[in-house]
Amino acid sequence: MSAREEAQRFLDQLRAQHHAKLGTFPDRIDPAVAKDFGNRFLRDSLIPEQGQDPQMRALVERMTAQSVDDMYSEMLAGMQDNIEKTAAARIEGIDLAPRRPLIGHLRTGQLNAVSMLVPAHSGAYLVLFEDQMALFVFTLSNAVAWAIPHGPADANGRMEFKIGVRDVTERIEANPEVAGRFANIIITYADTGSLAQAGLHLMPPGYFRLSSQLQIALVYFVLGHEYAHILLGHLDTARKGVLPATEAEALEYSWQQELSADRMGMVLSINACIEHNSMDIYNGFLGIGLYFDALDVMDRAVSLLQTGDENARQLGSHPPSDLRKQRLRDFLPQLGGGEPANAERVETALALAEVQGEIIRLLWERTRPILLELHRSGVQADPRWLTIPKEIGD
């Protein structure tokens, strides 16, 4: 049996054990709901040229007709290839074929992906994404993008965004629906462990490109981070008990390993964004910042519902998000190679990341009291969230 077949068999076992333990069934997409959303998306969320483009219409129709497994497979297959091409171009003599992981999804109780060796098979690797992560990234990217004001649309429906602290503050204060959408996503996910009840909010025309870039950059970073664990040999020292199925051998956790994987993951993800998705360095860095902001917000939301204290617990083991963001901020100038044009792009990336962080802060300020009131009324976080006492340190 090949390494990939071994990894697939182990993933099937994990899923069967997981659903048996929780008394749940694999997620399925209601075809009628998916088709309706696809039609509304083409009609209401794209500029006319995008909505009428045959390739765009075919893509939306294909995505809305897929199972959850197919959706994940299609979304991640091309990105996995691009991460590997980016790694091969930067790491001399590397042969990724023997270590190519199978990418899957499972309810992990954490907002991340998990790398592991398949038990009793030294050459089979598995990377598991939290099964709600794709939908969470989609809805959150939309909510954050919607908080950014814009000027009048041009003749083609394209808009110039006003990305400044004052601009986004005024937008959030003037339009309560912006914070309402964000709160709905965070509260529903923390309370139920799923986004099925949150609804799929459509964006007005002009926001599609911005939101899509945030989504792509964020997923590239998570995937690049997990590849970094494999490339750096972190799976050679594995322990048990990270996933619901206790026999899974998962990454042995340490702050140093996480910070090292963050750095390599940023190199892989930002360059993949540039080389394969026609983005700039600041697009890639915004996706990374959004991931850490999302992780921090969900830590706080689940902790509030569990304990009434947003700083008491966190989802799984990881260094503080602020520390991880600061380490990558400090490292970002090295990606520019010292060239003046790249130095300007780095400065733009850092400035835009500050504004995005302010958006999250303002939206969280408006979400926190709602969660606290829910906790006081007896609402609890979904029990499938796996939390530990909040880790602090430097």
Image (cartoon, grey):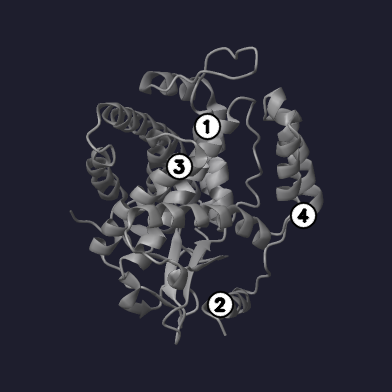
Q: Are marks 3 and 2 in contact (CB under 8 Å)?
A: no
Q: Which residue is mark 2?
A: 14
Spatial CA distance of label 4 from label 3 is 36 Å
Which of the two labelled residues, at mark 3 and mark 1, occupies the earlier sequence position?
A: 1
Name the mark nearer the viewer: 3 or 1: 3
Spatial CA distance of label 3 from label 2 is 35 Å
Which of the two labelled residues, at mark 4 and mark 2, occupies the earlier sequence position?
A: 2
Q: Label 1's element? A: helix
Q: Callout 2, which amino acid? A: Leu
Which of the two labelled residues, at mark 4 and mark 3, occupies the earlier sequence position?
A: 4
Q: Label 2's element? A: helix
Mark 2 surroundings: few (<14), some (14-19) or many (≥20) residues within 10 A: some
Spatial CA distance of label 4 from label 2 is 24 Å
Q: Tell me the residue at 25%/62% (across/down).
A: 255
Q: Callout 1, which amino acid? A: Leu
Q: Which residue is mark 4?
A: 30
Q: Label 4's element? A: loop
Name the mark nearer the viewer: 3 or 2: 3
Query: 389 or 369, which lies in front?
Result: 389
Q: Which residue is mark 3?
A: 275
Q: Are marks 1 and 2 in contact (CB under 8 Å)?
A: no
Name the mark nearer the viewer: 4 or 1: 1
Examine the rendered structure and indicate whether residue 196 appears above or below residue 52: below
Which of the two labelled residues, at mark 1 and mark 2, occupies the earlier sequence position?
A: 2
Which of the two labelled residues, at mark 4 and mark 1, occupies the earlier sequence position?
A: 4
Q: Which residue is mark 1?
A: 210
Of the 4 image quadrants, the one containing the N terminus is bottom right
Spatial CA distance of label 4 from label 1 is 28 Å
Residue 379 percent location from the top left of the image: 52, 55
Q: Tell me the residue at 51%/44% (across/down).
A: 216
Mark 4 surroundings: few (<14), some (14-19) or many (≥20) residues within 10 A: few
